[in-house]
Image (tube, helix red, strand yellow):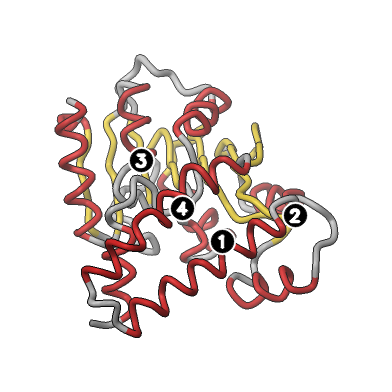
Amino acid sequence: MDDFTLLIDLHKHGLRQGPGGDAQTEWALHLAGVDRSAPIELADIGCGTGASTLVLARQTKARIRALDFLPEFLEILQARAEKAGVSDRITTIAGSMDNLPFHDDELDVLWSEGAIYNIGFEKGVAAWRRYLKPGGILVASEITWITDTRPTELQQHWDREYPEINVASAKISVLEKHGYSPIGYFVLPETCWLDQYYRPMQERFEGFLNRHGHSDEAQAIVEAEQKEIALYEANKEHVSYGVYIARKMA
């Protein structure tokens, strides 16, 4: 079994595929000033198994299109939506975030938690702007330096993994450059990393290894995840996800 298939199996059993939290999704919704009683058009890009999608469905009357390139994740999202009684307002789409299946000026809100890095923050905000109505809202979380300097080991790790990582002021400048007016920003607290993402993942390691016969490939994935967790725990005051909320200028 290849590494990609193994990673899907590890992460599809998690409520979240990256750092985040229900309270933080709700806070972003509040800062965005979304009319929760209106049947707005909302797209959740890189939705995974639907943690943010379900919060948005419970908290609004939006018609939600949840897009991810992994059908395995979308099947789980659909089952969770049916259990939560909100499946009638959620349409799942298996597709690529760099070729969204929407019309120009179609969406009131474009949402993406922990996923825009897959195509890069600047490419994403520039390419996705066309799909928002004038005055429409973009909400995106993005890996962000939260101090001006950081340890060499941490800097080198993220320079390899995601060279576009930067401080919040640089990300806000990118939004302004591409025709958005920033209206909100906050940093995910460490509980969103540890309690909501890393600890549940660690609890799944044993079952994951058992399913795959403790193969070298499965063990290598667990070791890589443990290394990432240890790096975060040692440097959590320097890095997090920033949640960026901006309005499309006319």
Left or right: where 58 falls relative to 21:
left
Question: In the depicted view, which residue is nearer to us: 108 or 157?
Answer: 157
In the image, taking residue 88 as reference, residue 120 lies left or right, namely right
Instruction: Tell me the kind of residue under disc 3.
Output: Ala
Farthest-out residue, top? 37
Q: Provide residue 132's location: percent of width, then percent of height.
A: 44, 41
Labels 4 & 1 near each other (Cβ < 8 A): no
Looking at numbered disc 4 in the image, what kind of residue is underneath it?
Gly
Identified by mark 2, the residue type is His
Instruction: Give the foreground label among 4 and 1.
Output: 1
Q: CA distance from mark 4 to mark 2?
A: 18 Å
Q: Is residue 211 left or right of residue 154?
A: left
| Residue 52 figure quarter | top left
Q: Check disc 2: other Cα within 10 Å, few if <14, some if 14-19, many if 20+.
A: some
Q: Under tag 4, what secondary structure?
A: loop
> Residue sitting at 30 percent across and 56 percent down?
68
Task: Residue under label 2, please give it.
Answer: 238
1 and 3 marks in contact (CB < 8 Å): no
Give me the C-alpha separation between circle 2 and circle 1: 14 Å
Picture quarter with the N terminus: bottom left
Q: Decide which of tag 3 and tag 4 comes sooner along the chain.
A: 4
Q: Position of residue 14 (x, y in %)?
A: 33, 51
Residue matched to label 4: 18
Q: Earlier in the sequence, mark 3 or mark 2?
A: 3
For disc 3, the marked residue is 51
Q: Position of residue 42 (x, y in %)?
A: 35, 36
